[in-house]
Amino acid sequence: MNGGFWDGINHWQLWVNPAASASSVVQNGEYVVNITNGGNETANVQLVQLNLLIEKSSTYDISYDAYADGSRQIISYMAMRSSPYTTYGGYEPVTLSTTKQNYIYSFTMNHATDSDARIAFDLGNSDTDVTFDNMYLTKRRPSNMLFNGEFTHGTPGWYLYVTSPAAASCSVQDGELVASITNGGSNSWDVELNQRSVLLENGSTYQVSFEAYAESPREIIPNTSMASDPWTIYGGYHTVTLSTTKQTYTYFFTMNHATDPDARITFNLGTSTADVYLDNIMLTKGSTSIEDITEFNQNPESFKLSQNYPNPFNAGTEIRFQLAARSFVTLSIFNLQGQLVRTLVDEEQAAGSYSVYWDGRDHVGDIVPSAAYIYRLKTNSSVFSKKMILIK
């Protein structure tokens, strides 16, 4: 939380042993630790953040930018807040230079879930000042359950079924699957693209996401179902209207039927002769959302706002967005009454992809109640909004 220090020093603490002397300040959007006496131990000066939820068996990435007034070492790690101060990940010395660099390390939580873990940066045993920026803790997303969803191997794993009088074929061009349709038939299922042998477990929740566009506006129907008679639909029909611009679509469903080790994911492409382009098809387990279909708005190939993950969430959530060009960016959280809850980003940023963590607290640091919230990304040229749910 507050990893870009747009909220000053809030949520960060500088722990200084009596044997050392140090202070901190935010200058030009960076967190500067001024050390006049680093003591004799690396732990004599620590920059920490508390109350972090680290879940058993989950994998995390810790990323930060840092530099120093001269060459020196620091140590970063994730650990238990109190005795016995078990280290969960990290604890590898990093040598800083006078040039800002990005550092990243990953770890898997092999201990019991800890809802009050801490991230720490040991800065003692040196009198050299250290400067930080863009400090993020990211929980890795589940892996894709589908084979060849990016079509890097051509069409293997995917099958196009065409029912007469429909006529269609598929190929991979420029890394995208192209369904070329000369006759769409009279039913949506007359042209079907699908993948079988998908394990769907009773009681589990799944997320389906994909990128798609068409040569002219048209509808398609993605769904998950039984692969044989009676062809039971597991995830409902989700009619999507494609445009000529590539967009990302997402829907969620819970498997309320018996576990099926041979389910299929299907895209119904019939009733239209407009060719369809698909890419980055993903099926992941464990996500939920209050929205069945989420679409990117306005120029999605340039500026994108992703659905937060996880959603719903009970401690913190990650929000990702992409900028095609340098822009002044404001990322804010609102309640459903339109009242501002928290501003996470309010600064100019260069083109690129960004990840921001919201800890479920408002602008004064109080934990907000369970409810639906709106997060809004505003750039120089676009405004995007999405919904998320906080459940305590």
Image (cartoon, rainbow, N blue to C red):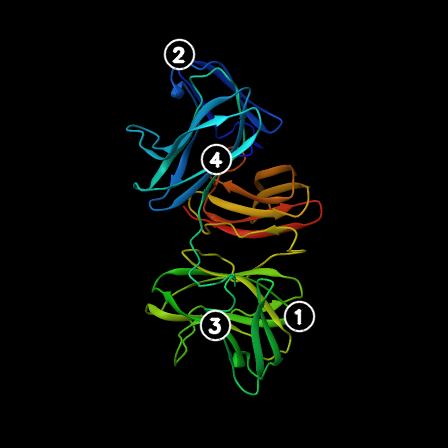
Q: Is residue 339 visible?
A: no
Sequence-earlier tag: 1 or 4: 1
Q: Is the residue marked by circle 2 packed among few (<14), some (14-19), or many (20+) residues within 10 Å? A: few
Q: Residue furthest left?
A: 84
User: What number is the disc on residue 338?
Assistant: none
Sequence-earlier tag: 1 or 3: 3
Q: Is the residue marked by circle 4 packed among few (<14), some (14-19), or many (20+) residues within 10 Å? A: few
- Helix, strand or loop at disc 4? loop
User: What number is the disc on residue 194?
Assistant: 3
Please name which of the two marks, 3 or 2, marks the residue nearer to the observer.
Answer: 3
Q: Residue 361 in the image: x percent, y percent?
A: 49, 38
| Of the pair 341 and 347, the residue shown nearer to us | 347
Q: Residue 63 in the image: x percent, y percent?
A: 49, 37
Residue under label 4: 366
- Helix, strand or loop at disc 2? loop
Q: Residue 288 in the image: x percent, y percent?
A: 45, 56
Q: CA distance from mark 3 to mark 2?
A: 66 Å
Residue under label 2: 19
Q: CA distance from mark 1 to mark 4?
A: 46 Å
Q: CA distance from mark 1 to mark 3?
A: 22 Å
- Mark 3 is on which residue type? Asn
Residue under label 1: 217
Q: Is the residue marked by circle 3 packed among few (<14), some (14-19), or many (20+) residues within 10 Å? A: some
Q: Residue at x 44, y 15 (%)?
A: 38
Q: Residue 329 in the image: x percent, y percent?
A: 65, 41
